[in-house]
Structure formats: structure tokens, C-alpha cells
Image (cartoon, rainbow, N blue to C red):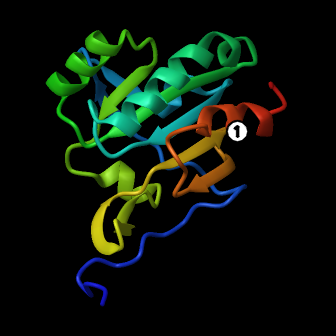
Amino acid sequence: MTDSTVPAPVRLSPGDPAPEFTLSDADGKPVSLSDHRGRRVIVYCYPAALTPGCTTQAVDFTAAAGELAEAGLDIIGISPDPVEKLQKFREKEDLRITLVSDPDKQVLTAYGAYGPKKLYGKEVVGVIRSTFVIDSEGRIEKAAYNVKATGHVAKLRRDLGLA
């Protein structure tokens, strides 16, 4: 039974304009998608900092960040966590990627990464682990929903022809 008050998220597809955003990073500084115009950007949406799956994914993105940057790709991770939690996450795991806070979930919703999902067989409302590759002009190049935390970065590297 789905909760009729929470509509199914709108899914983005290749060619769609990427929803613009300005969110605070782990240091409280504003980060805008438009700041990256002219470069490709990987925007990945994850449920919660300092949890096992999200840590695996962030550590994997950090490990691949140099290679991705050389290929012209910046990385931005979005979660509903407060800035202070993102700062702890970055320090504890030595993350060298940009993490931004979307506490009201407006950006996550705009990307179709917030809404009903299955968790341990139950339907809940929350962040849908998703990854988007945005081209240098701000359009969706790739959109992947319900991605697995483990092995996702390796698959993305293969899909981008980097592995």
C-alpha cells in the first residue's frame, strides 16, 4: 500500500536539464551546480553519512576522484544530513570529495532521488540512492536510480570508459 500523500518521484532521463541547486558543503560554504559549468559533474544522492553503505560509496568515490578529475569529472554527494554531520563524516573517513547538505530534501526531490522505496521488504519514504552524470552544459548524461553502494563506483568508471 503506498502513501498517497507522497507521490512517486519524477525520474530524470538523458537529455533533461539537470535541476540547478546551491547547497552548503561540509564547511558551510555554498556549492552550486552552475559553478561547474564547462566540466562534467557526477552528482550522487545518498541516504545518510556515517552509515556502512554510504561510507563505502563515499570512500570509493574519494579513491577514484583523481582519475575522475583527470577525465574532466567533478563529484558532488548530496544527502539530507546537517553540515556538522557531513564535516564529521569527511574527517572520520578522510573524504576528499564535495559533500553538500539538503535538509529540506528539495534538491533530492527535484532529482527524483527522494520518495517511496523498498527497505527490507517494507515500503518507506526516503532517499533513493541515485547517481547522475551531468554534461558540461548542465544536461543529464546518465541517470541511475536504486544503485548499490558497493561496487557502484567501479561500475560507473566502466560505464564512463575509465576502467
Residue 75: in sight, yes or no? Answer: yes
Whether residue 117 sits left or right of residue 65 in the image: it is left
Residue under the image location 30 percent in, 74 percent down: 122
Name the quadrant of the C terminus: top right
Taking the image as shown, residue 70 lies to the left or right of residue 56, namely right
**Residue at the image position 56 percent from the left and 15 percent from the top:** 63
Where 6 falls versus 79 (above or below)?
A: below
Q: Nearer the viewer, residue 17 or 62?
A: 62
Which of the 4 quarters of the picture holds residue 102?
Answer: top left
In the displayed structure, would residue 56 be above or below residue 79?
A: above
Q: Position of residue 74 (x, y in %)?
A: 59, 22
Question: In the rendering, at what x and y percent does residue 22 appear?
Answer: 36, 34
137 or 100, nearer to the observer? 100
Badge 1 density bin: few <14, some 14–19, many ≥20, Cα 10 Å:
few
Residue 28 in sight in this render: no
Give how far across and how far down residue 16 sits, in percent: 65, 57
User: From this viewpoint, which residue is outermost toward the right?
Assistant: 161
72 vs 57, nearest the viewer: 57
Query: Left or right of 155: which side holds 26?
Result: left
Residue labelled with disc 1: 155
**Picture quarter containing residue 156?**
top right
Where in the figure is residue 1, as x and y percent of width and height? 30, 90
**In the shown orientation, is residue 143 left or right of residue 129?**
right
Q: Determine the secondary structure under disc 1.
A: helix
Indicate whether 145 appears above or below 48: below
- Total of numbered circles in the picture? 1
The residue shown at (55%, 57%) is: 145
Which residue type carries mark 1?
Answer: Lys
Q: Residue at x 46, y 43 (%)?
A: 20
